[in-house]
Amino acid sequence: MAEDKPTFPTRRLHHVGVVVEDLEKAIAQMEAWGFGPFMFDEEHRTFAIDFKGELHGEPAEWTTLISNAKMGDVELELLEPVAGNQALKETLDAQGEGLHHIGWLTTDLQGDMMKAKAAGAKIWTSSIVPGQPGFCYFENSPIGNLAIELREP
């Protein structure tokens, strides 16, 4: 009998994504509690990213404001949906601020997406643009209403 392989990566967790209404306010609160420092990259504390992709299988474009803080080997990712229809805004509208997803890096995004879909996972949203790192959120799990993200480095 063939060995069963897990649908989602079992390697190290990369990040925990939290959706927020006001990124600067969330950063101030988290840093007051001792998390951080929050930086998107070496030059920017926050960064707005424009995405083109799909939401519920339909074409979509959106903008998200993002910042990250290292927590050991895992990043805490704060995300503020600022424009367009997007999974983050759907979550914010439905349940307010809070845990949105857990994410892993993959070097075979499309292959891992196909594997997960074959096992019954449903894609919530994705952005795969040639020459840019892509990502995919799978629909929320029945456990904890938590989305799973696969993202290219």
Image: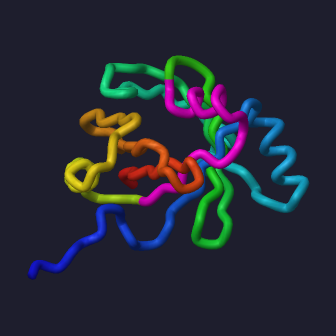
Q: Is residue 116 magenta?
A: no
In this orientation, which residue lies closer to the viewer: 122 or 53?
Answer: 122
Q: Is residue 63 left or right of residue 92?
A: left
Magenta stretch in the rendered image: 86-104
Question: Whole-percent x and y of residue 45?
Answer: 69, 42
142 above or below 129?
Answer: below
* Coloring scheme used: rainbow
Please tell me whether residue 13 is drawn above or below residue 123 in the rendered image.
Answer: below
Percent coordinates x, y for residue 98 in the rendering: 70, 44
Question: In the figure, 24 relative to 17: above or below?
Answer: above
Extreme residue in the front direction: 142
Q: Residue at x 56, y 28 (%)?
A: 90
Q: Residue at x 54, y 50 (%)?
A: 146
Q: Residue at x 37, y 27 (%)?
A: 56
Residue closest to the eye, 119 or 11: 119
Q: Is residue 92 magenta?
A: yes
Q: Percent position (x, y) of residue 126?
A: 36, 36
Q: Which corner quadrant of the image does residue 60 belong to?
A: top left
